[in-house]
Image (spheres, rainbow, N blue to C red):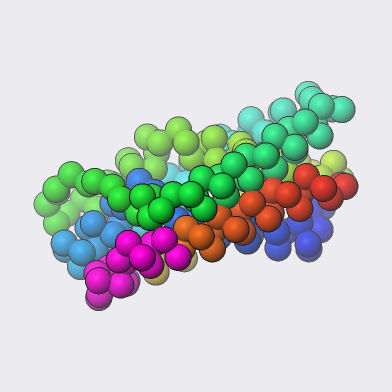
Amino acid sequence: MISLENYIAFCLAGLALAAVPGPTVTVVIANALRFGARAGLLNVAGTVLAGLMWLVIAALGLTAAVHIMGVWFDLLRYAGAAYLVWLGWKLLTAKGELGRGETQPRAAHGFFLQGFIVTATNPKVLVLFGMLIPPFLTENGSASLQILTLGGSFIVIAFLTDTAYALMAGRAGEWLSRPRIRMVEIASGTFLAAAGIWMALKGR
């Protein structure tokens, strides 16, 4: 079963990833700024459903990988740890650029479907689950249960951060200035790099 320290480290890494504006957050913010917080929140609901879909796919694939790889499991864990460090470095050197993005203008309806499509058609979500989760798995207990627990926790964290962005954008778009985005990038990059190093040095 997942230890408390592993779970806390995962949640911190997940929070760091979820807090940085990417394609999904860009759509949420853009719609909230243009149509109000409700539009952004409907986007968020759609992304949650798509995230659950990707989680099921990831759980099936990762569980099979853990059973097949056996002694190679450590390599998967170290690869995931290195990925976290790389993401951390990318954020630390981003200079506010990750806050940029585009969204196509849409009518004031269909925001739920829009959020679902943006996330469901983004294969990077599956890659994210495939690289973020393995460093925090242990060989004790059910791999499927651990993957669903960690993945489900990430979806909850992403839901909370996306909701916060929608509400802030709906009420005060000026808060999401580039300097503040840069502050988020620095904090998130530090958390990710630290989590990757910690998992690489820590024994199971």
- Disc tally is 0
Using the rendered view, name the quadrant where residue 76 is placed.
top right
Q: Which residues are magenta?
A: 167-183
Residue at the image point whose x is 70% and y is 34% from the top: 79
Main SS, magenta residues: helix
Residue 177 drawn at (x, y percent)? 30, 66
Using the rendered view, name the quadrant where residue 183 is placed.
bottom left
Residue at the image point whose x is 16% and y is 62% from the top: 34
Using the rendered view, name the quadrant where residue 187 is placed.
bottom right
Q: Nearer the viewer, residue 133 or 83?
A: 83
Q: For the view shown, which residue lies furthest in the bottom direction?
A: 171
Quick check: 84 left or right of 182?
right
Vertical position of residue 56 compared to residue 92: above or below: above
Q: Let me know if residue 95 appears in the view.
A: yes
Q: Nearer the viewer, residue 103 or 156?
A: 103
Residue 56 drawn at (x, y percent)? 57, 40
Residue at the image point whose x is 14% and y is 48% from the top: 105
Q: Is residue 136 magenta?
A: no
Residue 101 drawn at (x, y percent)? 28, 47
Vertical position of residue 138 compared to residue 18: above or below: above
Q: Let me know if residue 166 appears in the view.
A: no
Q: For the view shown, which residue lies furthest in the top direction?
A: 68
